[in-house]
Amino acid sequence: MKIKEIITVLEEMAPLAYAEDFDNVGLLVGNQDDEATGVLVCHDALENVIEEAIAKNCNLVVCFHPILFTGIKKITGKNYVERSVVKAIKNDIAIYAVHTALDNHKNGVNKIFCNALGLINTKILVPKPNFIQKLVTYTIPENVEQVRNALFDAGAGKIGNYDDCSFTSQGIGTYMGNENSNPEIGERFEFVEAQEIKIEVTFEKHLQNKILKALFKNHVYEEVAYEIYDLQNTHQNIGLGMVGELEKPLSEIEFLQLVKTKMQCGGIRHSSLLGKSIKKVAVLGGSGSFAIKNAIQAGADVFLTADLKYHNFYESENQIVLADIGHFESERYTKNYIVDYLKEKITNFAFVLSEENTNPVKYL
């Protein structure tokens, strides 16, 4: 099996188009055409993890955090990033990162977070904007089913929990072909008025090329009339963070103790307790201070995230309990999810969960 075949499965799990613009995801080091000997899945592709991959005969390291995040102009081994990259290159080890591509997936980092706490009725906290497009096209009634089904198969027509969504309307289309035309209905230089059906479907914007390919392949017209629009709708199944509910309310202390146990936290920094029971919980794995207002607007009793600064805690405004449980801790089970996903999709290959603890934060 080649590395690129494993990458295909990884991109089904976490499409790169889901990643934030600032991020650096995908294949960071290595050649996707190399034969894969084994896959090591980790949280951070540090030098000791690369050594672990060498020892376990794994030439592909799948990490959550990208070891190469910002621009790098020299590779001299002077810091932990450069040392990891040098060791990987010297030993023909590829590195692939998922990061916010998995953060934004409805079954990704924050769903894993919610599952660990037993939350139900979950939904995205910060839905992704500017990600939906709309296709409008026109064809004869006899061609409608073929075109529409092809668009569905290409990924169009998904709205929330519903698939195969479209709208059709009827009207009259007109055209007149020139000397180079080959019309499906009528003749060259003939003014044609034909009964046509208008088809409208929405789709995730990264699927545009696939959608258009399906349209052109299945449309009967020589010249296909179509329009594509950018929609301002947010995507309710793609985005950062998640909000859910406990099956039974807990006191604030009981809940924070539950979090500390389930997420194996060395400690939890939190804002003032409000003396209210906890029922609705917002989570955002990793750095999530930007979503405090979203958590309040969602009506959450508590917001679990990481990397909160001193002044962020004031933003609770006595409306919500803010809890910083640790960056690594909030994403703790992500690598387990990746391994389980790969093992389910590719049953005859060696996927290894890294035994290295790459959390740089220690507690007394």
Image (spheres, rainbow, N blue to C red):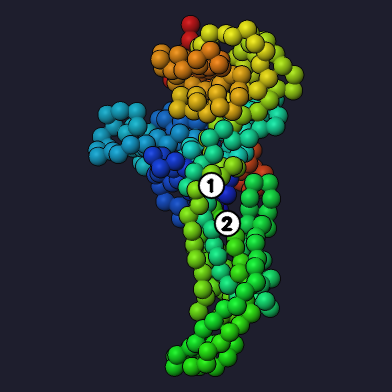
Label 1 crowd bin: few (<14), some (14–19), many (20+), radius 10 Å:
few
Name the image quarter holding residue 86.
top left
Discs 2, 1 touching: Cβ within 8 Å: yes
Residue 334 image position (x, y, % from top left)? 57, 32
Q: Please state which of residues 101 and 147 is positioned toward the viewer in this rendering.
A: 147
Report if residue 37 is visible in the image.
Answer: no
Q: Residue at x 28, y 38 (%)?
A: 72
Q: Residue at x 50, y 66 (%)?
A: 227
Residue 123 image position (x, y, % from top left)? 63, 35
- For marks 2 and 1 on the same chain, the one whose residue lies earlier in the sequence: 2
- The disc placed on residue 233 is 1
Residue furthest to the right: 248
Q: Is residue 169 above or below residue 8?
A: below
Residue of label 2: 202
58 left or right of 121 in image: left
Report if residue 343 is visible in the image.
Answer: yes
Residue 68 image position (x, y, % from top left)? 37, 37
Q: Residue type at mark 2?
A: Thr
Q: CA distance from mark 2 to mark 1?
A: 11 Å
| Nearer to us: label 2 or label 1 | 1
Label 2 crowd bin: few (<14), some (14–19), many (20+), radius 10 Å:
many
Q: Is residue 322 above or below residue 293?
A: above
